Image (spheres, grey):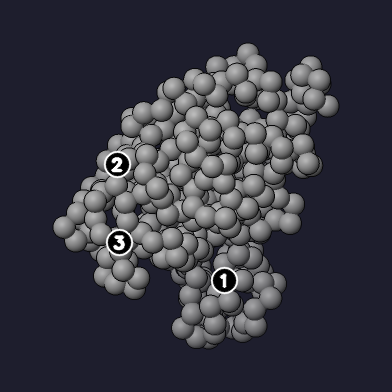
Amino acid sequence: MDFPFTRIKGGVGAPLGFLTSAVSCGIKNPAADRLDLALIFSEHACSSAGAFTTNRVKAAPVRVSQAHLRKGDLRAIIANSGNANACTGVHGIHDANAMCDAVAKPLGLRRSEVGVSSTGVIGLPMPMLRVTPQYDALIAGLGPKNGSDVAAAIITSDTHPKEIAISFDLGEHRVRIGGCVKGAGMISPNMATMLCFITTDANIPSASLRKGVLECVEESFNRITIDGDMSTNDTVIVLANGASGMPPIRRNGKRCHQMRQALRWIMLELAKAVVRDGERVTKFVTVQVHGARIYLDAKKVAEAVCKSALVKASWNGGDPNWGRILHAVGYSGTRIREELVDIFIGGKAACLGGLQADTPMEELRTIAAQPEFEIVINLNQGEADYTMYSSDLSPEYIDFNRSEYAYWKQSRKDGRV
């Protein structure tokens, strides 16, 4: 960001006026005591906005949250890990609504003021017999310093919780933004498979917040990929309660621009954290496409390269295989001229004019062996560009994802399938 800010602790609990809580229900495994049910609640009325999966198969909580946002603004979010409540039919909708009702009534809210999110195994009914008894403890545990518990409660195959919070000045008022995200596999643009919750005590009217969220999601979470798969549960929800005491942010003014910049920065940091924590990944690769005729061409090229299994396998092996990159450029659906394409790996020329460059292969291998590096593709046909963040594809990723049907056994014990 081009204005000063300070990193602070607390994640989604850092902004003023937000209370958070998390408890253990044993949703995935009754014998486990990890946190798996979380609640975010604003003590003040909020502006709110959301972005959701574009998958035509949408989980019950996605459908419910979308419906609630169409009715007005949210003041609370209840979320769980361990079960996606996806492909669960009418009963899944009932369970998602029940989760909203369970926190809405004691908090003095309408059901439509509560967003609901779930993540985990697809196709299994929610084990409500273990969730329902924990609502009282969830609400009783609400406090201003539990934001990190929310980040821990929503992870699934993640290796660690991912959260961030900052404070900065907007005019004469100090404001705070906090966020957390989960995501490690089934990561592909539009949107990456994840849950992301962001809170702020800035005073942003709903219309401006919704426009800003959609723009910032496009520039962050829609620019990452790990394995090219798209989930049924992808959700980003942002709540702004104005508890900082600042006046409303005027649309298109300086403070609006600063707030959007801060929101984009938060989302991009969280998006990058998702890729770095991808399931069994060993590389974080930034791919920049320059010189495209139009924006859409640059985007197509970046996505083709970042989703290519061959390219990602070569990254895993530390192989600077520019030929695989060029072949992905060629099938991207963009009109290119092979003899104009330049490819740089870590700032070193690997391909110039569609041909092998003079850079010694050992120099390129040294770069590709690093845990993080950058690839620049110049199409030399125009001024449009696009950036994406991707990872390698490892043998361990395949082994990790070979089977998750062991969880059906527990569901049978619960009498749910």
* Residue displayed at 27% across by 65% down: 255
Q: In which quarter of the image is residue 298?
A: bottom right
Q: In which quarter of the image is residue 26?
A: top right
Residue 149 in view (yes/no): no
- Report, in whole angstroms, how far the alpha carbon at label 3 lies from the one at label 1: 35 Å
Q: Is residue 222 above or below residue 337?
A: above
- Element under disc 3: loop
For disc 1, the marked residue is 299
Quadrant (top left/top right/bottom left/bottom right) for the N terminus? bottom left
Which three-letter amino acid code belongs to the residue tagged 2? Leu
Marks 3,1: beta carbons within 8 A = no
Checking the image for residue 248, the label placed there is 3
- Rendered location of residue 377, percent (x, y): 51, 71
Q: Quadrant of residue 125?
A: top right
Residue 260 in view (yes/no): yes
Q: Which badge, 2 or 3, comes first in the chain's sequence?
A: 2
* Mark 2 burial class by Cα count in 10 Å: few <14, some 14-19, many 20+: many
Q: 245 or 325, which lies in front?
A: 245
* Residue displayed at 62% across by 82% down: 336
Disc 2 versus disc 1: nearer the observer = 2
Which three-letter amino acid code belongs to the residue tagged 1? Lys
Disc 2 versus disc 3: nearer the observer = 3
Q: Is residue 66 above or below residue 337?
A: above
Checking the image for residue 16, the label placed there is 2
* Residue displayed at 46% across by 44% down: 75
